[in-house]
Amino acid sequence: MGNEREKIEFDILFVGGGPANLAASIHLMNLARKKDMELEVAIIEKGATIGSHSLSGAILDPIALREIIPNYLESGCPVEMDVQEDEFYFLTKNKSFKVPFTPKYMHNKGYHIISLSKFTAWLASIAEELGVNIFPGFAGTEVLYGEDDKTIVGVRTGDKGIDKDNNRKTNYEPGIDIIAKVTVFGEGPRGSLLKKIDKKLNIFHGRMPQVFETAVKEVIELPESNYFSDSSGKIVHTFGYPLGLNTKGGSFIYQMKERRISIGLIVGLDYSDPMLEPYKEFILFKRHPFISGIINGGRVLQQGAKTLCAGGYYTMPELAVDGALFVGDSASMLNIQRLKGIHTAMKSGILAAEAIMEALIKDNFTRETLGLYKQLFEESWVRKELYAARNFTQALSKRGISKFFHLGVQYFTNGRGIIDPLPIKEDNKMLKEIVSNDLSIPDEQVSRYGKLEYDDKLYLDKLTGVYLSQTQHEEDQPCHLIVHDPELCSNECSEKYRNPCTRFCPASVYEIEVDEETKKRRLILNPSNCLHCKTCDIKDPYGNITWTCPEGGGGPGYTLV
Ligand code: SF4
């Protein structure tokens, strides 16, 4: 390919190869077949393969899947196990207490335990059979607008073959302009293109702030004799230790095939202690006597991290603009109360596909026509489900036991609670300043973790975890993490917060170098470690970090999580 920028046209372009867009493309192709309509449909995905950037718990409620693939089990859907038994525990530092009843929204019996990376790869194979063009390794980096400067007409993919000083290498290939009648954005939580669209079109105007949680997750292979040896399809959720009652979050352990389990800790990013480190909380959790009793003798096969959008109904953006729709996590379609977002994401994709079909029939792709998506959403089960959980994350964000009071009232008022809507603040406004800003005290001494022990097998340090996420990036490329004002890191952020990026990043991308003489701190970046979780883009107290897409194909290589 030369240096000329290519332009390709499709009828419909899906940005992101997650469950929402895959469901949308499958449903759209089926609708088109029924109407004898020829459609050119494309999905672009920044990961090297479909599924390589997909990470979730994950329990699948198959309600939406059944709508598009009724015989999904016969069609080879990769189910690990069916849930037979829910267990719910409250953990103190050394003890565990089984909660005598599980709230009804946490009932999972009959649902499927899956690996999201395997599941999305399978959905992609079905979409391809239906004629969808799938382009992994292509990251959308710019949104393209029409002459009116407000109608979205497609996206530009990132250039390839640029070195770290922004010079063209011999393998330089300019990005491609992909033009479509409708572009569907399903970039997952904190979409980088969605942020740009919001700046221009204000799609989050009037909504409550987006809030997120970060999950660190592993797949562990257990020894022959283990907690789950009866293949019972058992799942365990916990709350309490190590996060306590002032930090939102909890854990999950799901039984998988072949003596494997999926285990993770989810930490609400509204935490206030700048020294908190989600990754180390995960290690503390694994070291808890109850949890270590479950995992002892095992070994970690894969690790990863990702944020999830926790805000729900009140944080959803406008769903349609001229030429574009927003689906899945990008549109806050996750039910944090049920700790599930795959079925809601898929349903949003299905509804988007129906709106697109109507727009194709009318040959009209304005916000008004595409707005049918919002109307369909309002009439659907997914709206009912998300609306019932509309104040849940806000209640969980309350400090101490007051959260249980709010949750209790919500439980008996179908989500309304005491105040509706219950307000919430942006995650990056929540950090409290460290009382002592004496930088001569090393970070380890201010830390709450003491000396955590790692063993390279079951309790991994961050870098071993990155290795097991199979993360790879082209080293010689521009840094995809934009630190807008490095001086802020060296000065104010050091003094007030001790550079929390070095702790909230689960992949040791951010490090601080301290000058021996002046004691001045300088931020150093290791962007090749990046797991694309987006925590830094969300939690930095100054909004000083912007995550952008690196060269397409870079990032984690998940296959099991
Ligand atoms: Fe996540 Fe940012 Fe760290 Fe990458 S650099 S792993 S996006 S926190």
Image (cartoon, helix red, strand yellow):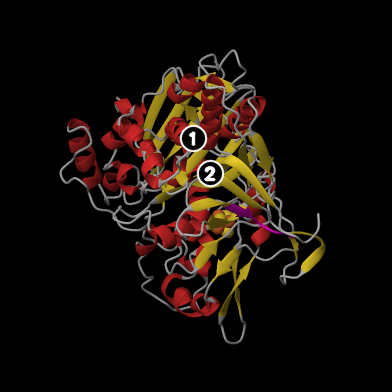
Q: Which residue lies at the image location 39% right of the left edge and 46% below the top edge?
A: 367
Of callouts 1 and 2, which one flags the residue occurring earlier in the amino acid sequence?
A: 2
The three-letter amino acid code for the residue at tag 2 is Lys
In front of the other: 531 or 502: 531
Would residue 515 appear left or right of 537 to someone viewing this image? right
Residue carrying label 2: 181
Residue 336 % position (x, y): 37, 39
Quarter of the figure with the C terminus: top right
Say whether marks 1 and 2 touch (CB < 8 Å). yes
Stretch in magenta: 155-160
Q: Which residue lies at the image location 62% right of the left edge and 37% below the top edge?
A: 51
Quarter of the figure with the N terminus: bottom right
Residue carrying label 1: 360
Label 1 secondary element: helix
Label 2 secondary element: strand
Kindly report the distance in space between the C-alpha atoms of the residues bearing marks 1 and 2: 9 Å
Relative to 61, is 324 above or below?
A: below
